[in-house]
Amino acid sequence: MNVNLIVNPIAGNKALRSIKKIEDLLKGKASLTTFITQKKGDAELFAREISSRISRDKSQISNLLVIVAGGDGTFNEVINGMLSSQESAAKKKTVPLAFIPLGTTNVLAKELNISEDVEKAVHLALTGTAKKISLGRINGRYFALMAGIGFDGETVFSAKNSIKKISGKGAYILSGINTLIKYNPPLIKIKTPEGTFTGYTAVVGKAKCYGGNFHITPEANLTEPLLDLCLFKGKTRKDLIRFISGVIRKRHLNFKDVFYGKFPEMEIASKEEVHVQIDGDYFGTLPAKIDVVRDAISLVW
């Protein structure tokens, strides 16, 4: 087996010291090539290079495994690099990916019950079963877990731009508090095949897990070619606090001002600026066209 390891050494507190251990575990069992990122965007570039190389020599597909060691953002970069064009997407669907969680939150690992113990995760990567999963796609960019529109999009945006000295969860907690204090959200409109819905914050999920072990879209499934929409219609800070409390207590879907549905595609817009995050990283602002790419990648777990 040929293994291409894409690793982000600053994904989490233990990432840098885990690289050698991962390599040592892999070298005795596979032919290994390691790609170490130095900045944001490198993982996507490495994945694109791997994708291009396979396009030139299709025989590599049968014995190649790409292992992503990092956080959810690193994995997002890799899937976008591997599926960087329609031509490459069609050819790379059979190239298996595996994930070794080294990030702060590791939502994908929690979704798939992948251990955060490096040795166990490497063993699963080498011995697990490759299964097809469907990806979300927003304005042409893929996501594996979720797109957050409104409150959490604003939270990620604010953390990205203003909290420079705090890393990990601390930055997002403080940013979330600051966003809540000034919460005055614009109305968003979501057009689906079954009608148009309005609200103030939304999560479009491909996975159940969110921000760790919270379940905002509890009926989502990575293998299902549908998007789960959880739309919150409350506008005030008090409403939002109630919604967050409901998520924590797993009761939010019982609220009258929460809409939940499954759709193959949707368009989301607002007359004002509304921020969006995907897989925990800042994406941009509305409008957004979101659809599903069925069986987009093979993932080992």
Image: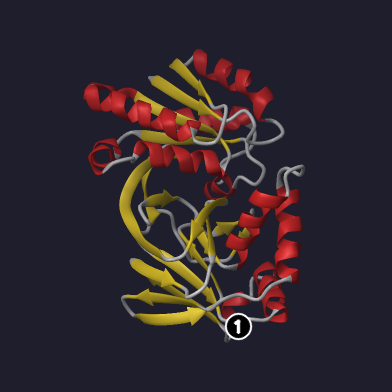
Which residue type carries mark 1? Phe
| Image height of 276 relative to 104, above or below | below
Task: Give the image location of residue 199, x and y in percent.
Answer: 52, 79
Q: Secondary structure at mark 1?
A: loop
**Position of residue 125 in the picture relative to residue 96 (left or right):** right
Give the side of residue 222 with respect to residue 165, left or right.
left
Residue at position x 52%, y 73% from top?
Answer: 272
Where residue 68 appears, as percent x and y from the top left, is 50, 33
Q: Residue furthest front?
A: 272
| Residue for point 43% across, 71% down | 269
* Residue occupying the point 49% across, 28% down: 6
In this rendered view, identify the residue nearer to me: 165 or 240. Answer: 165
Q: Please state if 63 lies on the left or on the right of 175 as rendered.
A: left
- Which of the 4 image quadrants contains residue 51? top left
Please say if 63 is above or below 99: above
Q: Residue at x 76, y 57 (%)?
A: 174
Return the residue at label 1. 255
Estimate how packed mark 1 is, as few (under 14), some (14 to 19) or many (20 or more) residues with alpha carbons within 10 Å. Answer: few
Q: How many numbered badges does the structure rendering display? A: 1
Q: Quadrant of residue 45?
A: top left
Using the rendered view, name the quadrant where residue 89 is placed: top left
The colour mode here is secondary structure
Residue 136 against residue 85 in the figure, above or below? below
